[in-house]
Amino acid sequence: MEVVILSDAAGVDVQLLAAQTRRDDARFFDGDLELAGEYRHMGEAKPSWQGL
């Protein structure tokens, strides 16, 4: 993500950037939870690597 600060109110820009970063982190985290759910369903199917 490219960051360009165009105003003199750098504090406001940094706060907005931090909020955007938190939203991105939350989106990635939600994806991880969905992926973990997929693996949990795979575990119910007894994949060959489960006993390793």
Image: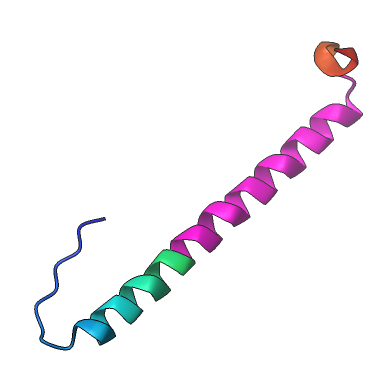
Percent of width and height locating residue 8: 10, 87
Q: Nearer the viewer, residue 52 or 48?
A: 52
Image-quadrant location for residue 10 = bottom left
Say left or right for 39 vs 3.
right
Q: Is residue 48 magenta?
A: no
Image-quadrant location for residue 4 = bottom left
Q: Is residue 14 above or below residue 35?
A: below
Q: Is residue 9 above or below residue 38?
A: below
Residue at position x 45%, y 61% in the image: 24
Residue at position x 84%, y 11% in the image: 48
Q: Is residue 38 above or below residue 12?
A: above
The magenta segment is: 23-47
Q: Is residue 37 above or below residue 21?
A: above
Residue at position x 90%, y 14% in the image: 51
Say left or right for 39 vs 34.
right
Q: Quadrant of the N terminus?
A: bottom left
Colouring mode (rainbow / by chain / secondary structure / one colour): rainbow
Residue at position x 90%, y 30% in the image: 44
Percent of width and height locating residue 18: 38, 72
Percent of width and height locating residue 19: 41, 75
Exactly how many numbered labels are in the figure? 0
Q: Is residue 40 magenta?
A: yes
Percent of width and height locating residue 6: 9, 78
